Structures are given as structure tokens and as C-alpha cells.
Image: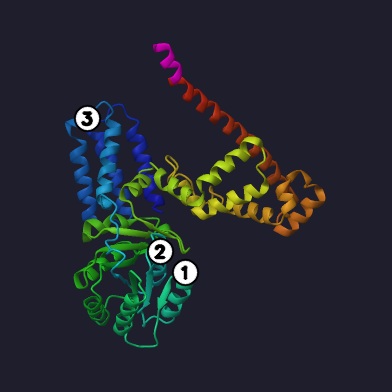
Amino acid sequence: MLEKLTQKFTDVMRAMGGKAAISEKNIEEAVDEIKMALLEADVNLRVVRRFVNGTIEEAKGEKVLRAVSPGQQFVKIVHDRMVALLGDARQDLVLKGPDTVSVILLLGLQGSGKTTTAAKLGLHLKGKGRRVLLAACDLVRPAAVEQLAALGAQVGVDVHREDSKDPLAIARNALARAKKELFDTVIIDTTGRMQVDEPMMAELERMRDLVRPDESLLVADAMTGQAAVDIAKAFDERIGLSGVILSKFDSDARGGAALSLKSVTGKPIKFVGVSERPDGLEPFYPERVAGRILGMGDVVSLVEKAQASIEKEEAAELERKMADESFTLQDYLDQIRRVKKMGSLKSLVDMMPGLAGQLTDDQVDEGELRREEAILLSMTRKERANHLIIGPTRRGRIARGSGTSVAEVARLVKKFEKSRLMMKKVVKNKKMAERFMGGAPAAQGRGGR
């Protein structure tokens, strides 16, 4: 996500942030680099001008030039302006309570990922405790109805579909079914076209007037850059948007759409698609994304992902196993699966402060993780429970079963043994630190009496 932009901003921020004193010339040079980075990222020209002029004006103020740490002050100014550019604060969906049916109208062109997003959004809201019904009203794109039905079954969300050729009738019946069967949210997957045209807009206007949506969300392909902004303006003028979902955000190396949408259209980005998986839809937090772009990482999102993949009791049990060296290859396999559940290694690295945008795909080897998983899966339960029994014959069998070499199997076992020793030391040091910190206040209290 936004790799090139992140790399350039990180370089500028690192150079400016470390300066004990900065001049107007330093500021102008840094802002020129920022300007070029934004233009290369396909950000709207007027948005770039406003961003650059505002940054220069604020950065040349007395508060910065005479500050204790002017470099850090400059970094803060750029960060705050980037947050404002992206939309200031997280904008959540505005839906009714569980006793009334809320309607979400999904809009977008063909190929934007609208149908997939409908299922992802359904899964997201299901996780929030809502009862969701997907309405298959895209009757133009071949197999759109079948695709939504298959995705709905995959995520465990009901889909309303009919043989009718009237999308308005299907929507009306979906709402009636929602009231009858006590669904509290209906997500309507509407007709798309290859481009904005009058028949599509006229149909969507009739759909809007019929269902009176609580949210009208445009699903736009982040990879189309400024075209996504123009599409959003066209839909907003005719239908009226409450927000935007940027699909394929994980593939957008430039970021022009994300950085231009709010300023140009006034509509917030509410969600972003971060993978093809059913759970690959995330709420959009401007401050967190700004932090990633500037190379500050996104520790909050990283922690949230970790919390979602491991329970408190599991973490305590894992720590116990690390402490007494009962951590096995089966536990190692479980950890690999948890990491995969959190997303790609590249996306996790980009959330770490100082590493965002610094490592290329070649430097983050996803293949190594897959090879290790294959090796572990080729072992028997007995071997994963006790790695000491894996001798030359067993290594040969495991290598053949995993499509790797005997050397790679031996390397994994050796790596595991080193990891166990390191884990034990980490847990031991942590416990010693906790005892020390826990005893300090008590000792001070006794001495004060």
C-alpha cells in the first residue's frame, strides 16, 4: 500500500526530523520533495497546491523556526496536514438500531469489486452483531447474482435473489423479507456499467427513492487514481453519497485516490479493501494511514490484528510453554497460521515504525513462511510433538512430502531449537523486570516511614 509515496515521505521526514535547526531554505527544499512525491502519486493538482502552500505557511512561522526541536515540529505539521487531507477522523457507518431495518446501497462501476465488497461488508457487520441480508440487484453483469450467492454462503450471510428482471422489485421484496425475518441490515448490490451512463444513473435514482438508504456507498477501485475521484463526483451529483469504500487498496502503490477523495468530493473514505479474503475489509483511519505514509508505522492496527488472532488465555499458555521449553513444532505451526491470518508479511512490516516503505517485496520473503508451513505439515503429529526423533530417514521423508530439500528440513529444526532458547530468555528477562518494577515502590515506601 502506497509504497513509493511512503518511501519518499519517510526519507524527507527522517532528514528533517533529525535537524536541531532548520532554515527557510530547508523547509522549501523539503516541501519541494513532498510536492513531487504527491504529484507522482497521482494526487489531484489543486489538493497538492493547498497541501504545499499550507505546509510552507505554517512551517515558516516563528513557532517552528524558534522551537526547541524545529525538525520534529515540521514533521508534526506535515503529519497533521496529511491527516486532514485523508479526512481528519474515522467516519463510521450511520445505521439504525436493531429493531429497525437499515439499508446500505452499494454503487460502482463494473470491475470496481462491488459484489465482493458487499459480502465483505456483510461479514464485517455480522461480526458487529447485526443480522445482514444481501440483496442481489445487479442484473446486468453476467453471473453477478451467482457470485453474490456463493460469497454469501462463504461468509455465512443470507442472500436474497430472484429470477425477476426488475431490480426494483427484488429490492422491494428483500426489504419485505428483512422485516418479516427480523434482519436489521440490508445491503443492496446494484447495477454497474463499464462507465457512467444515463440509463444506469436513472435506474439508481429510482432505486434510491424506493429504498431510502441510510448509507449510499461508492465502491471505487483505488488503482484507478484520479479516475476514482471523478467517478465519485459523478455519483454524488446524481445519487448523493454518504461515503466511499476503496477496493484494492493493498495493490495501490501510488495512493492518489485516497489522498484526493475527501478534499475534492467532501465524502469520507469509510472502508478500504486490503486483500481478496472475505475478512479483507478494514475501517479507514486517516491518522493511522498518515502515520504509515510518513514512515511512523501503525502500531494500533498491528496490535488489533494480533488481538483478533490470539485470545488472552492462549497468550498465557504460550508464555508458559516458552518459559519451560515445552514449546513444540506444533505450536510453531500454530503461530505461522496466526501470522497468516493477520495478513501478508509485507502489510505487517509496513505497520512497524521505521520499516514502512523501507523493505521491498523481495526483502520480505512470503515464500519462506509457506515452505516452513509445508515442511511442518509433512511431519507426523508425533514428530511435531518431539523434534528430537527427527533423524536422517525422517528428514528425507519430510523433504519429499513437502517438496523441499533435506537441508531445508534440517535448517528449520535448527532454527526452531534456537528460537526455543531465545524465547526462554525473553520470558525469563520479562519476569525479572516485572519483579524488579513491582518491588521498587514497596521498597521506597518502607524507606520513607
- Side of 23 where 443 appears, left or right: right
The total of numbered circles placed on residues is 3
Name the residue rendered at 46%, 64% in the picture: 278
Crowd tier of the residue under label 3, counting other residues whose Cα lies within 10 Å: few below 14, some 14–19, many 20 or above: some
Label 3 sits on residue: 65
Q: Residue at x 51, y 49 (%)?
A: 310
Which element carries disc 2, helix, strand or loop? Answer: helix
Is label 3 or label 2 in front? 2
Secondary element at image label 3? helix
* Residue 436 inside the magenta-drawn segment: no
Write down the region rendered in magenta: 442-449
Residue toward you, 237 or 422: 422
Q: Residue furthest bottom?
A: 164
Do the CB atoms of the residues marked 2 and 1 lie less than 8 Å apart? yes
- Residue at 70% x, 41% y: name it: 414
Q: Position of residue 385 (x, y in %)?
A: 71, 48
Q: Residue at x 46, y 72 (%)?
A: 151
Give the image location of residue 326, x and y in percent.
67, 40
**Mark 2 nearby-residue class (10 Å; few <14, some 14–19, many ≥20):** some
- Residue type, label 2: Lys
Residue matched to label 1? 156
Compute the Cα span from label 1 to label 3. Answer: 57 Å
**Colour approach in the figure:** rainbow
> Contact (CB < 8 A) between labels 3 and 2?
no
The local secondary structure at tag 1 comes to loop
Reading the chain from its start, which is encountered first: label 1 or label 3?
A: 3
The answer to whether residue 356 is seen in the rendering is yes
Please state which of residues 286 and 121 is positioned toward the viewer in this rendering: 121
Please tell me in which quadrant of the rendered image residue 296 appears. Answer: top left
Disc 1 residue crowd, few under 14, some 14–19, many 20+, Cα 10 Å: some
Q: Which mark is residue 244?
A: none
